[in-house]
Image: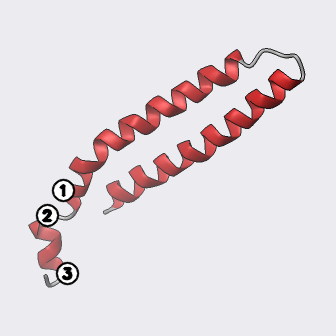
Amino acid sequence: MKAVQSLLGDHQDSVVSRDALRELAVQAHAAGETAFTWGLLYGQEEASAQAQERELPQAWAEASGPKLRAALGD
């Protein structure tokens, strides 16, 4: 379950980071500055979140396997 919790926490961090990066890009654009770097950082966070989403099914399968269910009395 620790792996699942870690993946979900990292994904949530990415969601929050992308929101902040988007806001910083909007502010930079409004100030007449380039928002390119903010966009690159946003893209990296988006790729990170997608990787975590791809890892989640396997982590969940391992965490919810028969060994854990037996330990929980299922």
Residue furthest toward the bottom?
Answer: 73
Quick check: marks 1 and 3 in contact, CB under 8 Å?
Answer: no
Q: Residues within 10 Å of mark 1 (few under 14, many from 20)?
A: some
As drawn, 41 above or below 59:
above
Q: Which amino acid type is shown beneath numbered disc 2?
A: Gly
Amino acid found under the numbered disc labelled 1: Glu
Which comes sooner in the sequence, label 1 or label 3?
Answer: 1
Q: Which corner quadrant holds the C terminus?
A: bottom left
Please, is residue 30 above or below residue 64 in the view?
A: above
Residue at x 50% of width, y 32% of height: 46
Q: How many marks?
A: 3
Q: Position of residue 17 (x, y in %)?
A: 62, 41
Residue receiving disc 1: 62
Q: Quadrant of the N terminus?
A: bottom left
Mark number, residue 23: none
Tell me residue 43's x, y (percent).
54, 25
Q: Are marks 2 and 1 in contact (CB under 8 Å)?
A: yes
Q: Nearer the viewer, residue 15 or 5?
A: 15
For disc 2, the marked residue is 65
Residue on which disc 3 sits: 72
Amino acid type indicated by mark 3: Leu
How far is mark 2 from mark 1, CA to CA? 5 Å
Of residues 42 and 69, the one drawn nearer to the viewer in this rendering: 42
Please tell me whether mark 3 sits on a helix, a strand or a loop: loop
Q: Residue at horizontal 40%, vertical 36%?
A: 50
Residue drawn where x is 35% and y is 60% of the image:
2
The percent coordinates of residue 20 (x first, y second) are 70, 40
Q: CA distance from mark 1 to mark 3?
A: 15 Å
> x%, y% of residue 65?
14, 63
Q: Residue at x 64, y 22 (%)?
A: 39
Structural crowding at the residue carrying mark 2, measured as other residues with C-alpha within 10 Å and reported as few (<14), some (14–19) or many (≥20)? few
